[in-house]
Structures are given as C-alpha cells and as structure tokens.
C-alpha cells in the first residue's frame, strides 16, 4: 500500500497552501484544486501502467465520482463554498480504496472526521471573530437571548438540575449537549449576524455571498444565489459603484488539512479507529 504514501504527501502539500490562501483571502484558486485532481489522477494512471494494475486508476476515478456527488450535495445545501467542494472532489482521489466495501466506509469515515474536526475548528475560529466584532456580537447576543429567553432559561435550569442529580457520565454528557443546544443556537445566530459586513465594490471577489438582492437600477437586479457573486456581477457593481452587504464565512479549508493529517496518522501507523454505530461498523482497521 506504499503507493498511497505519495498521494497523501501531495494532498497534504496542496491542502497546506490552499489553507493559507483561504485564511488570507477567504477563497481558494481553482487552479490549485484542479491541479491536485490532475496530478493525483495522472499519478494513478502512470502507476497503473507501470505495475500493470489498472484497479489503481479505476479506484481513483470511482473515488473522484463518489466525492463529486458528495461535494455537490454539500455545495447546494450551502454547507460548503465552491473552493471547499472542489477540494473535497480532489481528496476523493487519494483515499486508499482496496475493495467495494472501502468505497462505502472510507467516504463515510472521511466526511465524519471532516465534520467532527471542522466543528471543533469552527468553534475555536469563531472566538476570534467574536473578539474582532465583540460590540456587534454582544448586541446581537442580547437581542436573541431576550427573544428566546424562556427556552434558554428552562434549558439552563434543567442543566443545573442534571448536574446535581445525574450520576451516569454518558447520560449526563448527552443531556448536557441537548440542554445547551438553545444557547449554542443563540450563539450561532449572533455570530452569523456579526459576520455580515458592508463590502466596498473594489474589494469584492468571485463567490462572495450576498445577504440580499441588490437593485442596480430599474429592471436590473443582482440576485442572491448559492453560487455567490460572479465576475459579471462584480463588474456591474463596480460600474455603478455599489457597496453591498456580504455574509462572510469561516475559512474551512484548514479543517480539510487537519482531517488529512488525522487520516494519514491512522492509515500510516495502522491505528484502529472506532466510529459510531450509525455507520454500522464498530471498527475500521487500515492495513
């Protein structure tokens, strides 16, 4: 399985630079994602020819196909931006598929890890956003706290009671997560409002998400879509010197990098990774 070492290293390098780009510019260039796809597929082709093992390229193409579908699902559900979705397609090529079963559990494992690690990463990153926009965040948090004060109050009381009377650690953890959901919802809504900013038309980039439709003139409107602003839209906004409200997102590519590192460690060191029962698999062993 040493043929996958090179794929992981290449994916790590590309994802590392994509993470830097995402953190600095809030976008990932198409050439970076497409280059990773082309490079990894080309490697699979040459390896298959040299070793006379055409399963290697077939598995890579099948992996790309599966992640192509997943990326479109996440993109159109607004879970991922365009750059994230394209990177997901690329990483589908590098996973160490070995048989039909692996085409089920490896994508599930990768997505599970990505969202688990991504959730932790997003929470940590959100603290920096709150700090930078603390006045706006506090205002929004107070607004939503007043709006949902009954639900938040009941949850807080039940949380305190559960701490006093529940003895089982697993039951306490489950109930704690459930009871803190209203507070997390209020935090998320307040954070979302804090991430809405007015952008000067000269600072707009392709894919920026509009908060609402922009009326340029009578009969001419730029619609808010899942795809974000196009280059044509930006050119129009610059022509009419229109500043717009943009909803910023958390740069998510570093979560891909962290997931790749975790998956690489599990794979290269043959560690056992236990996944939840809803995946109908108690253990996944890389060998």
Image: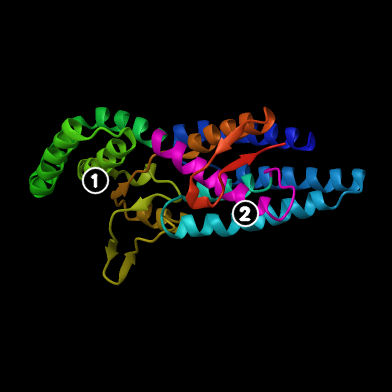
**Is residue 115 located in the magenta-colored stretch of the structure?**
yes
Q: Does residue 157 appear to the left or right of 97 in the view shown? A: left
- Majority SS type along the magenta span: helix
- What number is the disc on residue 104? 2
**Magenta-span inclusion, residue 287:** no
Q: Position of residue 250 (x, y in %)?
A: 38, 39
Q: Are marks 1 and 2 in contact (CB under 8 Å)?
A: no
Q: Is residue 275 above or below residue 160?
A: below
Q: Residue at x 56, y 49 (%)?
A: 108
From the viewer's perspective, is residue 34 above or below residue 26?
Answer: below
Q: Which mark is residue 185?
A: 1
Residue positioned 52% across, 59% down in the render = 72
Earlier residue among tags 1 and 2:
2
Nearer to us of marks 1 and 2 is 2
Gap between marks 1 and 2, in whole Å?
A: 32 Å
Q: In the orientation shown, which residue stands out farthest toward the bottom? A: 219
Please name whichever residue, 149 or 240, is drawn nearer the observer in this view of the structure.
149
């Amino acid at each position: 399985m040493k043929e996958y070492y090179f794929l992981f290293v290449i994916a790590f390098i590309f994802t590392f630079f994509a993470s830097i780009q995402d953190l600095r510019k809030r976008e990932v260039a198409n050439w970076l994602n497409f280059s990773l796809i082309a490079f990894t597929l080309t490697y699979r082709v040459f390896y298959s020819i040299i070793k006379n093992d055409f399963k290697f390229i077939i598995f890579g193409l099948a992996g790309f196909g599966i992640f192509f579908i997943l990326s479109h699902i996440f993109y159109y559900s607004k879970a991922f931006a365009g750059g994230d979705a394209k990177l997901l397609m690329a990483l589908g090529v590098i996973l160490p598929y070995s048989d039909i079963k692996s085409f089920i559990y490896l994508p599930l494992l990768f997505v599970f890890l990505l969202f688990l690690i991504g959730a932790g990463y997003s929470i940590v990153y959100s603290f920096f956003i709150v700090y930078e926009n603390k006045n706006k965040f506090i205002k929004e948090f107070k607004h939503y706290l007043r709006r949902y004060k009954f639900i938040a109050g009941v949850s807080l009381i039940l949380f305190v009671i559960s701490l006093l009377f529940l003895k089982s650690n697993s039951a306490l953890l489950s109930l704690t997560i459930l009871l803190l959901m209203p507070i997390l919802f209020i935090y998320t809504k307040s954070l979302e409002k804090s991430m809405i900013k007015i952008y000067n038309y000269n600072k707009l980039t392709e894919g920026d998400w509009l908060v609402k439709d922009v009326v340029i003139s009578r009969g001419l409107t730029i619609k808010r879509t899942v795809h974000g602003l196009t280059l044509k839209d930006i050119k129009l906004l610059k022509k009419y010197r229109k500043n717009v409200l943009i909803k910023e997102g958390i740069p998510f590519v570093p979560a891909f990098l962290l997931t790749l590192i975790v998956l690489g460690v599990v794979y290269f060191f043959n560690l056992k990774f236990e996944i939840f029962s809803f995946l109908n698999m108690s253990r996944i062993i890389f060998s």
